Amino acid sequence: MKVKNRERETKVIKQIEESAELKEALKGQINLLLKISEQITQAFRKGNKVILFGNGGSAADAQHIACELMGKFYMEREPLSAIALTTNTSSLTAIANDEGYEVVFSRQLRGLVRKGDIVIGISCSGNSPNVLRGVEEAKRLGAATIAFTGQGGKLKEIADYVLSVPSTDTPRIQETHITAGHIICFLVEEALFGNGRE
């Protein structure tokens, strides 16, 4: 039993270390994180909004980041206009049923995006067809596009800004995506509402 417990402990330590290594790798993308936060900050200053989307765990990350912007991060302040496209199940299921799952994001974007908005597509593989279609549609409509992805995929080729996690391990990529999302929310909040934490 003790040997089995040690093996399980070793596996847990490995998971923690792998996650920490990828978060450490974000230090190599500091300039990108600053550029993304500046783009989002400028969009909010001009009265534009941020729209996010993804599938599965990436949908949860999109909702999480939208929540931090709309609600609060560290500071009590005015809400920032942020929408996750995965929260309206009626729209998702109607569009998927009537037109196909590949257009569940691009169709919603056609109704929501205005020039100058920021659109963030999240896909660990970088190849999710509905995310690719969404980013392409957002570009056509005049939005600035940001991709959160892993180390490969077509998404890297089409988005204006690409935060790429050097891994193919979906859970580790998602953990790093939300760390990056939190950093961006911190930088945007600080730029718009001043320094300090509550």
Image (cartoon, rainbow, N blue to C red):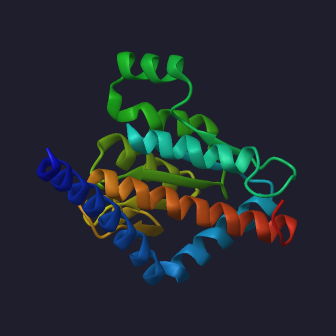
Q: Quadrant of the C terminus?
A: bottom right
Residue at (59% x, 76% y) in the render:
35
Q: Is residue 168 visible?
A: yes
Residue 145 visible in the current orientation: no
| Circle count | 0
Residue 189 against residue 68 in the figure, above or below: below
Position of residue 22 relative to residue 8, above or below, is: below
> Relative to residue 6, is residue 146 drawn left or right?
right
Residue 25 image offset from top left, x and y in percent: 39, 77
Q: Is residue 66 above or below residue 108?
A: below
Residue at 81%, 64% in the rendered image: 197
- Residue 93, how many percent across, how many down? 43, 18
- Percent position of residue 194, x then y: 86, 70
**Residue 129 left/right relative to 78:** left
Q: Quadrant of the N terminus?
A: top left
- The front one of 10 and 174 is 10
Residue shown at 87% from the left, 53% from the top: 77
Horizontal and vertical percent position of residue 98:
38, 16
Q: Is residue 133 left or right of residue 117?
A: left
Q: Is residue 14 above or below residue 128?
A: below
**Foreground residue among 73 and 198:** 198
Q: Residue at x 82, y 66 (%)?
A: 192
> Residue 56: which quarter of the image?
top left
Instruction: Please state which of residues 186 and 81 is positioned toward the viewer in this rendering.
Output: 186
